Image (cartoon, helix red, strand yellow):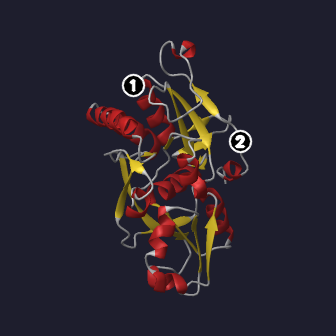
Amino acid sequence: MEWKRYAVAGVAAVMTVCLAAGCGSAKKSEDTGNAQRNKIVIGLDDNFPPFGFHDESGELVGFDIDMAKEASKRLGMEVEFKPIDWDSKETELKSKKIDAIWNGLSITPEREKQILFSRPYENGPQILLVRSDSPIQGKADLAGKIVGTQQGSTGLEAINAEPELRDSFQELKQYSDNVTSFMDLEVGRVDAVVVAKTTAAYFMNKNKADFRIIDVGYPDIPSGVGMRKDDTELKAKLDKVLQEMHDDGTSTKISEKWFGIDISM
C-alpha cells in the first residue's frame, strides 16, 4: 500500500517555517517559555496522517500542520515543528523543549491534570478498525484477540477504561505510531486496532485499505492544543485566533481539504 512508505520515512527533520512578515530579523529566545516569544515550537508525532506526516517529497504536511501555520501567521509568530516521542509528550512540554503539542491531542481529564488546553478545534470518536473479512462485530468479540493501539493515545485510554474487557485480550500491543499498527492489521499480526475514526477513514480512503470501521460507542472526545499549565498568555492568544479561524470558515476549509468533511469546532 502507498502508506507503507510513511512507516520508514525519516523522522529526524525539524522544519521551521517563517510565517510573519519581517520575522527573520526578530530576536529569537532560546527559552521557549519566554512571554515575549516570537517563535512557537510545536511538538508532534510526524508519522500521524492526516494530522501530521511527510508526503512523497519529504515535506511535513497535514491537517494540524495547516492549522498551526495559519494560527501562527495570525499571531505574528514563526513556527517550528519538532518530532517527539508521543509517549513522552508531557515531559517534552514540561522541560520546555517544545511550547505546545498540536497533533490531534484529545482533551481528557487525565491529560488536563498536566496540560493546559486551548479551546477545542476538532472532534472525533475512537473506533475499532478490523480487516473486512474479520468476524469481529463489536467489543465482545475481542476476547482472545490481539488488539493494537498507539502508545499514550486516547485509544489506549479507552481500552484501559474497561479493564475487564482489556484483560480478556490475548495481547494488547502498543505502537509508537498508527501506521505500523495498520500494517500489522493488514498482515494479520493484530486482529483489531483502536484508533480515531478520522485517522482510520483517511487511510481507508487514500489507500483503498481493505478494512472495516466498527463504531462501538466510544464517546466523542474533542482535540485541543496542549500547553504548559502556566502558559496562560499563549492560551489566551491562541484561543482568540482559533475562534477567529472557526468563525471565518478557515478551519472548515482546512478540515474539508484533509478529511472531505468538516470536523472542526
Helix, strand or loop at label 1? It is helix
Category of crowding for the residue at label 1, using alpha-carbon neighbours closer than 10 angstroms: few (below 14), some (14–19), many (at least 20): some
Residue 181 in view, yes or no = yes
Residue drawn at x 60%, y 30% is 30
Q: Identify whether 156 is placed above or below 42.
A: below
Q: Identify whether 255 is placed above or below 17.
A: below
Can you give x and y, in whole percent of width and height, for residue 121 in the image?
35, 45
Residue 213 in view, yes or no = no
Residue drawn at x 57%, y 46% is 95
Can you give x and y, in whole percent of width and height, for residue 11 in the image?
69, 44
Amino acid under label 2?
Ala
Category of crowding for the residue at label 2, using alpha-carbon neighbours closer than 10 angstroms: few (below 14), some (14–19), many (at least 20): few
Can you give x and y, in whole percent of width and height, for residue 32 in the image?
54, 34
Helix, strand or loop at label 2? It is loop
Can you give x and y, in whole percent of width and height, for residue 132 in the image?
54, 70
Q: Which mark is residue 74?
A: 1
- Report the front residue among 49 and 46: 46
User: Residue furthest toward the left?
Assistant: 247
Residue drawn at x 50%, y 47% is 103
Quadrant (top left/top right/bottom left/bottom right) for the N terminus:
bottom right
Do the numbered discs 2 and 1 sit on residues whose CB atoms are within 8 Å?
Answer: no
| Residue at the disc numbered 2 | 12
